[in-house]
Image (cartoon, coloured by chain):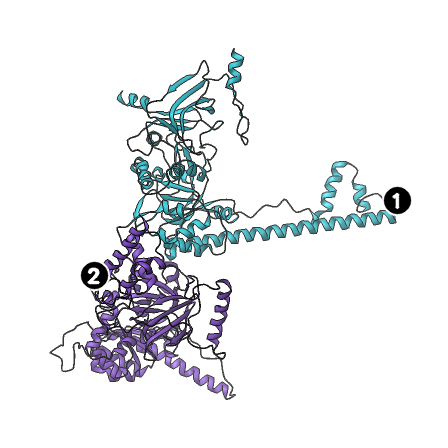
Chain colours: A purple, B cyan
């Protein structure tokens, strides 16, 4: 092909592709604002700011090696990852409009609207998108295998379910007593912790089981009382015998009453929930209740005993007309729990992940379940907390994940719209500072509303792909298609 | 006349590294003449005569003088060609029994075999001369063996009974724990032996020091009282009238200071023994992997250790080795892979893993049939042809069916590229071996015809 033909071809391709050079537009959102140029090096360095100092050092080091090169050049091995141009839903500090999240290695380094991006940093141009903390899947099944520390030995970092989890926005899942990060492609850092929950059966179906549990706990409580008395005596300098022996004491129950473990209950009916409240009043301990279909009818009591809930807003159970008490499910369950200050996380109807199964009702679409709670009156921010920070709190990892704050783990998802909207897809997932999922390149959802190129580089790449030519230089593009790029209609035409 | 003929027959120059082969120059010579010979060392040769005598290729080239008494097989103009035979590294369909998951290092593959009557005929028909067999079971099931397809039946008489240690590292805690515990046990055994040796050396040194001291004392005593006889004390010297008694007395004298016996290493658990050899780098292990995830778990197990190993990639449903081809290539070890076009996971995008491995820098590639049974062997050439059609270099593919697997089985001197001085071990094909219509007509092992299709078919008709 001669040169003129190539130029013609390129022009034709650009016309045919009609690739908008403005920000990608998504039907859900307000019309995108005119994109800013890359927010690089705006702020003067502040010597008292430790982070800035670090970035400067790196920038200097980089400058020595790649002097006079493109300041926007990207080093794929850079410890920095900058995501810019998107609205950042921090969870703890509101929404930052069109800000930058700068990650270093596996942590978030800075969040804000004016953040210096170090030279060479890996970048994601997320203009017009929404950044959320990675979602936390409590009580998942089939995404990771094994339990406890064996999760590391059982983890398949290339498994379909890991990819699907990331595509669904999950970055951390609990399965059994193990908590795993979805570190695609590596085993490093997969084990995030262990729950150490103690499952307690406290169902009305087994009155003897309840009695036995209370009896066992009474022994532990008596022992603790004796122990405290003995310690007091000892502290007062009185002559004391040997410490009371912990004979016949269930160590798990001891940990529960000492506040070193968390009790896990399953209960849906008001009757069972109230019984658990009674139990927790008698034996105060940290607790998580899974189910909670009729929790709306005793939300105040659940709040007072400090229970945490894991609910499924779309789990339906009809009211029992023979009962002289509130019963059945309500779409307002989550909202009522929220109003009574009961922290909760959300679990879909099915706990595994699949491209088949019950569509929209498994871990692949966790936000849809939360969206249903929003429909029932739960504020959107509370729904976001329920699948991020509050879920992390239930797993005891709220100091590491669940919100976008400096110092926390760099586990983020970048969505092309509101997290709770049915059209929204996760475009990128970031775990431990690494981009582990990109909708455009992963084989699952790339074909559904493909992401449109929104930078010159991406436009060039797309043309190269379309024409299967070796390289398209900037000069050639400028000379051949520059007018087309400037045409506002060219970009508007595809909206 | 005869002398000049003999002179002509002498090879002009033997390859430098080749040991001079002693053979009877008057022995019976056989000449094979081909349109093409795939020597597998550079380009194929055209219009070649191969003079075989005493199991060795004595001369090879377009102009070979034919000895008067030579037997001549002229295949020119028929499309027939010669090439080294195929070697299968994992002919595990020859294994008769099954074992589960375990740390059974004591087993040899050959222990689990009973050869049926036609096994070597079946293999030779497909141009396969050598096979490796693996112990059954998973985890650490034992060590592989090597067989020559020479018609033996019943209890096999292997070429090599004890070759590689087979290690399977499936993703999952139990398999990983098995290998981890095995390596730990090997480390402990080595440590125990080192400690025993150190103790023995110390005892030996102490004894030597004591002897030296005693000798010095005796020397000093002798100097002080030259009249006294050499010896430790008068009584002993007096008792030592005859030589034998003297010797005994000497031994007794050293009674408590008897020299420590020769060092004997502590007895090893036979299940651990091959692992100890491996950790000492005296044995190669074959690491069997099912998916990219297995590779990461294997790397996790290996940690900082440096152990010699080969990889056997057998992708299951995952088919995702492409995720780690660069890492695998970076090890520089031999890779055994199925000659198969797979699909990228969850897509219909075709992937040529052998070609990807070569592109990533794998130098020693072994291609195995797509299934470990006889029909896999029968479709082997077709499978490789497909992989070659979709991008794998043909020369690399042919080596990966012959010389590389032979080297993996430690038989690189038995099956070599065809050259003057090399053993006359080759297969005569009716056409291109990668053409599924071609057939193996003759299989020669060191000049001996192990399989002749015409004869075999005649016998079958009878």
Q: Which mark is residue B296?
A: none
Label 2 sits on a secondary structure element that is: loop
Compared with residue A125, is residue A232 higher up or lower down, i.e. above or below?
Answer: below
What percent of the width, then of the height, locates residue B162? 46, 39
In the rendered image, is residue A468 in sight? no
**Could you tell me residue A282's position as x and y percent?**
31, 83
| Closest to the observer, B198 or B460 | B460
Closer mark to the observer between disc 2 and disc 1: 2
Using residue B229 as the reference point, say whether residue B203 is left or right of it: left
Q: Chain of mark 2?
A: A
Label 2: few (<14), some or many (≥20) within 10 Å? few
Q: Is residue A324 visible?
A: yes
- Residue A27 higher or lower than B36, as above or below: below
Q: Residue furthest left?
A: A321
Q: Which residue is mark 2?
A: A357
Q: Which residue is mark 1?
A: B227
């Amino acid at each position: 092909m001669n040169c003129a033909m190539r130029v013609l071809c390129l022009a034709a391709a650009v016309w045919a592709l009609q690739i908008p050079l403005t920000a990608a537009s998504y039907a859900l959102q307000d019309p995108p604002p005119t994109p800013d140029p890359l927010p690089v090096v705006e702020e003067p360095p502040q010597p008292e700011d430790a982070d800035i100092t670090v970035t400067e050092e790196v920038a200097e080091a980089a400058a020595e090696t790649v002097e006079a090169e493109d300041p926007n050049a990207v080093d794929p091995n850079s410890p920095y990852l900058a995501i810019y141009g998107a609205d950042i839903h921090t969870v703890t500090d509101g929404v930052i409009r069109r800000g930058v999240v700068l990650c270093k290695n596996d942590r978030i380094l800075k969040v804000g609207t004016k953040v210096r991006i170090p030279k060479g940093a890996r970048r994601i141009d997320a203009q017009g998108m929404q950044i959320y903390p990675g979602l936390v899947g409590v009580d998942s099944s089939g995404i990771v295998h094994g339990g406890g520390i064996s999760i590391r030995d059982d983890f398949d970092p290339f498994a379909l379910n890991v990819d699907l989890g990331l595509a669904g926005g999950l970055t951390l899942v609990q399965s059994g007593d193990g908590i795993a990060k979805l570190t695609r492609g590596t085993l490093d850092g997969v084990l995030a912790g262990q729950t150490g929950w103690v499952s307690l059966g406290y169902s009305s179906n087994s009155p003897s089981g309840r009695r036995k549990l209370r009896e066992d706990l009474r022994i532990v409580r008596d022992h603790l009382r004796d122990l405290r008395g003995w310690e007091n005596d000892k502290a007062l300098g009185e002559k004391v015998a040997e410490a009371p022996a912990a004979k016949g004491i269930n160590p798990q129950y001891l940990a529960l009453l000492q506040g070193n473990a968390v009790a896990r209950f399953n209960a849906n009916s008001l009757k069972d929930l109230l019984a658990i409240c009674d139990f927790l009043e008698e034996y105060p301990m940290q607790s998580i209740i899974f189910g909670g279909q009729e929790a709306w009818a005793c939300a105040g009591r659940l709040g007072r005993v400090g229970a945490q809930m894991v609910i499924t807003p779309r789990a339906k159970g009809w009211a029992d007309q023979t009962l002289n008490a509130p019963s059945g499910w309500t779409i307002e369950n989550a909202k009522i729990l929220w109003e009574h200050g009961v922290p909760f996380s959300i679990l879909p109807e099915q706990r595994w992940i699949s491209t088949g199964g019950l569509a929209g009702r498994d871990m692949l679409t966790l936000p849809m379940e939360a969206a249903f709670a929003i429909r029932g009156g739960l504020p959107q921010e509370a729904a976001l907390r329920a699948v991020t920070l509050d879920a992390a709190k239930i797993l005891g990892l709220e100091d590491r994940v669940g919100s976008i704050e400096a110092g926390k783990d760099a586990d983020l998802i970048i969505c092309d719209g509101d997290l709770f909207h049915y059209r929204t897809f996760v475009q990128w997932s970031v775990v431990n500072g690494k981009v582990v999922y990109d909708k455009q390149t992963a084989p699952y959802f790339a074909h559904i509303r493909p992401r449109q190129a929104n930078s010159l580089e991406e436009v060039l790449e797309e043309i190269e792909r379309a024409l299967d030519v070796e390289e398209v230089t900037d000069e050639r593009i400028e000379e051949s298609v520059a007018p087309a790029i400037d045409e506002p209609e060219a970009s508007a035409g595809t909206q | 006349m005869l002398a000049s003929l003999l002179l002509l027959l002498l090879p002009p120059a033997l390859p430098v590294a080749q040991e001079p082969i002693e053979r009877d120059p008057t022995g019976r010579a056989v000449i094979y003449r081909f349109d093409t010979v795939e020597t597998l060392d550079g380009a194929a040769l055209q219009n070649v005569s191969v003079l075989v005598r005493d199991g060795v290729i004595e001369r090879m080239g377009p102009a070979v003088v034919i000895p008067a008494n030579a037997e001549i097989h002229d295949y020119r103009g028929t499309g027939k060609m010669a090439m080294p035979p195929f070697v299968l590294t994992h002919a595990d369909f020859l294994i008769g029994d099954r074992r589960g998951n375990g740390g059974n290092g004591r087993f040899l593959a050959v222990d689990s075999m009973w050869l049926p009557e036609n096994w070597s005929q079946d293999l030779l028909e497909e141009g396969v001369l050598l096979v490796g067999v693996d112990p059954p079971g998973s985890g650490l099931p034992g060590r592989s063996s090597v067989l020559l397809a020479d018609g033996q039946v019943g209890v096999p008489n292997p070429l090599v009974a004890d070759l590689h240690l087979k290690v399977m590292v499936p993703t999952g805690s139990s398999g990983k724990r098995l290998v981890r515990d095995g390596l730990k046990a090997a480390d402990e055994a080595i440590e125990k032996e080192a400690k025993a040796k150190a103790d023995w050396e110390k005892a030996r040194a102490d004894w030597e020091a004591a002897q030296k001291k005693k000798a010095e004392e005796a020397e000093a005593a002798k100097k002080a009282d030259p009249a006294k006889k050499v010896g430790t004390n008068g009584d002993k010297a007096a008792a030592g009238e005859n030589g034998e008694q003297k010797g005994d007395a000497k031994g007794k004298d050293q009674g408590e200071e008897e020299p420590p016996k020769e060092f004997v290493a502590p007895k090893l658990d036979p299940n651990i023994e091959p692992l100890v050899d491996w950790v000492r780098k005296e044995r190669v292990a074959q690491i069997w992997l099912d998916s990219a995830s297995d590779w990461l778990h294997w790397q996790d197990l290996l940690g900082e250790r440096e152990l010699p190993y080969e990889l056997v990639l057998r992708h299951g449903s995952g088919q995702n080795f492409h995720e780690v081809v660069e890492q695998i290539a970076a090890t520089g070890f031999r890779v055994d892979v199925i000659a198969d076009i797979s699909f990228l996971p969850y897509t219909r995008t075709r992937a040529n893993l052998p070609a990807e491995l070569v592109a990533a820098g794998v130098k020693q590639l072994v291609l195995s049939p797509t299934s470990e049974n006889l029909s896999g062997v029968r479709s082997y050439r077709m499978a490789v042809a497909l992989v070659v059609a979709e991008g794998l270099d043909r020369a690399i593919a042919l080596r990966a069916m012959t010389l590389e697997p032979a080297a993996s089985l430690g038989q690189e001197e038995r099956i070599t590229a065809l050259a003057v001085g090399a053993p006359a071990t080759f297969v005569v094909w009716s056409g291109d071996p990668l053409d599924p219509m071609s057939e193996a007509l003759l299989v020669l092992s060191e000049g001996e015809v192990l399989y002749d299709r015409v004869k075999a078919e005649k016998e079958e008709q009878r």
